[in-house]
Amino acid sequence: MGQAYIEELSQYEGQEVTIKGWVYNRRSSGKIQFLLVRDGTGMVQAVMVKKEVSPETFALGRELAQESSIIVKGIVRPDERAPGGYELTLTDLELVHMADEYPITPKEHGVEFLMDHRHLWLRSRRQHAILRIRSEIIKAIRDFLDDRGFVLIDAPLLTPAACEGTTTLFETDYFEEKAFLAQSGQLYMEAAAMAFGKVYCFGPTFRAEKSKTRRHLMEFWMVEPEVAYADHEANMCLQEELVGYVVQRVMEKHIPELEILERDITRLEKIVPPFPRITYDEAIVRLQKAGVDIQWGADFGGGDETILAEQFDRPVFVEKYPVEIKAFYMKPDPDRPEVALCDDLLAPEGYGEIIGGSQRIDDVDLLKQRMREHDLPEETYAWYLDLRRYGSVPHSGFGLGLERTVAWLCGLPHIRETIPFPRLINRLYP
Ligand code: 4AD
Ligand code: MG
């Protein structure tokens, strides 16, 4: 029998298979050894009985260091107690590489130590579960949008101008010109929406966030849909449908991973649209009632978002923030120009803002005025203003932060484990 992957062992019951992988763990009791083998798709226990293998093979088993790479042959046996439901009766064992003493052992390690060894930490069961769920979330987001006729349009990462305020820009030299790493692909998606109607970009974005929190990365991934002729209301409907779909998909495909992470699944079962909606005004009153010293016009901190979100069992929309505290491109509410047609979606259980979205200004003069108020140079945004000169239409869009969504669905205390190689304020290694 040829090579098999551990996740497909059920197809090979009673047959001999070859598994190429690594030693996750090993224990022996006299005449029997138990090798826990991982191959990237899963883990299986290979049982080696002394009298059924060659003396060399049995001796080799005893010497295997954790994370040594091995090729195992064995017969697939059903075993109800085994994770995955199968066990291997080992018939042959080949050493590919004997590992040095592995730094990550089953004992507890400090976070900094694990982060320094992130390149190895990725092999552990918990990190494996998280990154598999991340991969599924990306696919679910893309399936949702692709099935609804959205076109994926890639936004540039090197840009001449800011999108989300000038304080968090990473600057770099671009042949004697200044360039910035993209904070968002939005402005380019607005151009694309005027060309394709429904579009999105999905890629890394960069922010020099000077604060050290459990919700901020310097490099994070964002999906940014943008829809021509969509208003604020349609924008929020799309957001809740997307989030509902993603949660549903993770529950459908990744219960074993959620169990490894000890995620309370009953909390996720409740995430079904429609989501509750409150205005910024109402949010301020709720915060004041909860004893927070905050006045109309102030932005929310992470703690405020948690207090608000804890009042609901589903994500909650906060709409219509003061224009003063939001980005320059957001359209003011025609009935009340001091607030914007915008929303933040706050995840439950203290995970904070996972989406920021808005209807965009479609009038060229108002947009120019807002850019002046924000000290943004008109020359750099000339192309963006053109979108309001050649067939301007109402349009809306939003950005969903991938890592915050992963943290929430996996129930993680910190955002650092949601991305393979996190970029944090004090960390650029490995
Ligand atoms: O609210 P933000 O800043 O919105 C935008 O960038 C818009 N241009 C999006 C759009 O309308 N196309 O960011 C959107 C989301 C946040 O809700 C949050 O989930 C995530 O991006 N985010 C971060 N995630 C991790 N680390 C950071 N430093 C983040 N900053 C924002
Ligand atoms: Mg925001």
Image: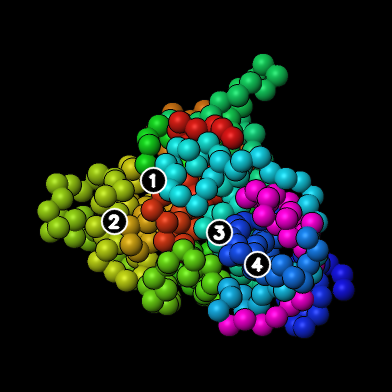
* Mark closer to the chain start, 4 or 3: 4
**What distance separates the C-alpha of mark 4 from that of mark 3?**
28 Å
- Residue 45 locus on image (x, y percent): 64, 68
Identify residue type, mark 1.
Arg
Q: Give the residue drawn at x 87%, y 73%.
A: 1
Q: Give the residue drawn at x 66%, y 75%.
A: 87
Element carrying mark 2: helix
Identify residue type, mark 4.
Lys
Identify residue type, mark 2.
Thr
* Mark closer to the chain start, 1 or 2: 1
Q: Name the residue beneath numbered marker 1.
A: 214
Q: Alpha-carbon neighbours of circle 4 within 10 Å: few (<14), some, or many (≥20)?
A: few
Residue nearer the viewer, 180 or 1: 1
Magenta span of residues: 56-80
Q: Name the residue beneath numbered marker 2.
A: 306
Left-right relation of 222 to 177: left
Element carrying mark 1: loop
Q: Give the residue drawn at x 26%, y 50%.
A: 303
Above or below: residue 175 compared with residue 204: above
Q: Does the residue tagged 2 have its C-beta within 8 Å of any atom of ligand 1? A: no
Q: Which of marks 1 and 3 is in front?
A: 3
Left-right relation of 72 to 240: right
Q: Name the residue beneath numbered marker 4.
A: 31
Q: Is residue 299 magenta?
A: no
Q: Name the residue beneath numbered marker 3.
A: 125
The quadrant where residue 20 appears: bottom right
Disc 4 to disc 2: CB gap under 8 Å: no
Element carrying mark 3: helix
Q: Which of marks 4 and 1 is in front?
A: 4
Q: Give the residue drawn at x 42%, y 67%.
A: 263
